[in-house]
Image (cartoon, grey):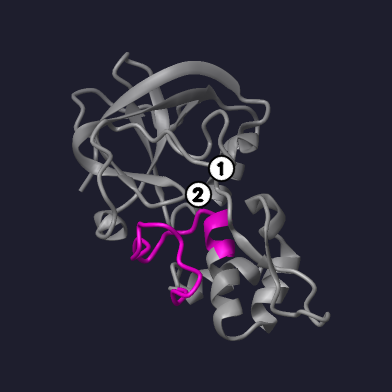
Amino acid sequence: MALLSLARPVNRNPELVFVYGTLQRGQVNHHWLGGCGFEGEGTVGGLVLHDLGPFPMAIAGSGMVQGEVYRLVDRALDALDRLEGYPRLYDRQPMPLMDGRLAWVYVGRSRQVRHSPVLGGGCWRGRRVLGLMVALGLGAAHPGALAQVPPEQGSGAATCQAWQRATGEQKLRLANALGAAHSLTRLHLERSPGPANPDAPVVPLYATSDLRRLCSNR
């Protein structure tokens, strides 16, 4: 079912994009908008925002989502499609902002957020994606040693190769780091919202099929 029902035809190729998650200023994926002009903040109706952990997802509903608006430059939309996994993970639709401007918006599907809480204010402030675990020194004196690094340092071909070689808990930690760094759709929320327990078992947060597809291109 379409998200929009407008009396007049919709421009199917708007020059703006509305972002509400990790593409916003100060967030980990903002550099993907390099060269795109900032057009101010904006609000989109007809959406409900869910918190998936390291990133949010908007789906159709009776709510509003707050975010930022950017003017697209050549090939920028193609790059954003790759980042957002369009059309498999996110759909991309032209939607009107509350101030009348029209912009592309990346939206998810209800089944993808069934385990995720709603952000009542429609605004995702973000968080530092720290503590992502990647394996260091495989084959060294302490092959199981893990270090905390920024997500962009744990998202490349080396981490994919380490994940493919690893086993057991180490493999799960690497898989979770890869999934978070690339904003894959989470299977569920982490079960323990309290302080980290080093003795708690590691829970897989991302589908193995999505991780294999990600690493097959690296």
**Would residue 29 appear left or right of 207 to someone viewing this image?**
right
Q: Decide: few, some or many residues near mark 1? Use Cα within 10 Å; few <14, some 14-19, many ≥20.
A: some
Locate residue 85, reporting x and y percent: 50, 54
Callout 1 secondary element:
helix
Q: Amino acid at mark 1?
A: Leu
Task: Identify the residue shown where x is 52% and y is 24%.
Answer: 70
Mark carried by residue 198: none
Say which quadrant the C terminus sits in: bottom right
Q: Is residue 191 left or right of residue 195?
A: left
Q: Quadrant of residue 145?
A: bottom right
Specify start and end residues of the magenta stretch as a single range. 177-202
Tell me the residue that label 1 is attached to.
80
Which residue of the protein is positioned furthest toward the bottom in this rendering?
167
Question: Residue tagged by mark 2?
Answer: 84
Residue beneath the point at 32% across and 13% down: 99
Which is more toward the observer, 27 or 110? 27
Residue 15 visible from this viewpoint: no
Q: Which residue is pictured at 62% across the width and 25% down the height?
A: 36
* Percent x, y of residue 19: 45, 33
Tag 2's secondary structure?
helix
**Main secondary structure along the magenta-highlighted residues:** loop
* C-beta proximity under 8 Å, tags 1 and 2: yes
Q: CA distance from mark 1 to mark 2?
A: 6 Å
